[in-house]
Image (cartoon, grey):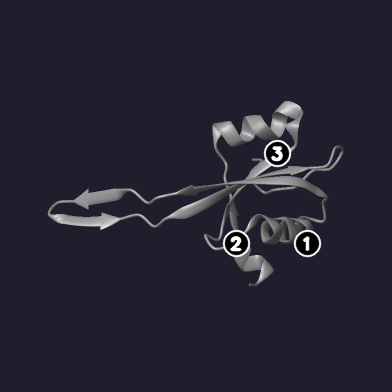
Amino acid sequence: MNIKSIVKKPIVTEKATILKEKGENKYTFVVDKNANKFQIKQAIEALFEVKVENVRTANYVGKSKRVGKSVGFRSDWKKAIVKIGEGQEIQMVDEV
């Protein structure tokens, strides 16, 4: 599996921002559904050049959505909360 295909995008929500700024050094990402914790750790360390302490993952089932008579589903996805070492930081473009 390609390193860049494992980490899809960062999650920028209020809860994720609190985890990052609270001093816990935790960052949240949407990752590939089939990636395990070891692969996620390797991908984050290679992409952002930081030392990863631990990885927590959560699988989410896509919700059903309805538009008129048509019924569809959002796709399933996986979230990874990555804790990095003290004094390190991941620079993201989300700061405006």
CB of mark 3 within 8 Å of CB of mark 2? no
CB of mark 2 within 8 Å of CB of mark 1? no
Give whichever of discs 3 and 1 has the lower sequence position: 3
Q: Residue lying farthest left?
A: 69
* Image coords of residue 60 (percent x, y): 45, 48
CB of mark 3 within 8 Å of CB of mark 1? no
Q: Amino acid at mark 2?
A: Ala
Q: Amino acid at mark 1?
A: Ala
Residue depicted at 25% across the width and 57% down the height: 72
Badge 3 density bin: few <14, some 14–19, many ≥20, Cα 10 Å:
many
Front of the two marks 3 and 2: 2
Measure how far apart labels 3 and 2 are at the Cα level.
19 Å
Q: Which image quarter is the N terminus in?
A: bottom right
Residue identified by numbered label 2: 35
Give whichever of discs 2 and 1 has the lower sequence position: 2
Badge 2 density bin: few <14, some 14–19, many ≥20, Cα 10 Å:
some
* Image coords of residue 43 (percent x, y): 71, 61
Q: Quadrant of residue 22?
A: top right
Front of the two marks 2 and 1: 2
**Marker disc for residue 26:** 3
Residue identified by numbered label 1: 46
Q: Which is more toward the observer, 34 or 44?
A: 34
Disc 3 is placed on an element classified as strand
* Image coords of residue 7 (percent x, y): 62, 59
Residue depicted at 68% across the width and 67% down the height: 3
Disc 1 is placed on an element classified as helix
Q: Quadrant of residue 27?
A: top right
Q: Amino acid at mark 3?
A: Lys
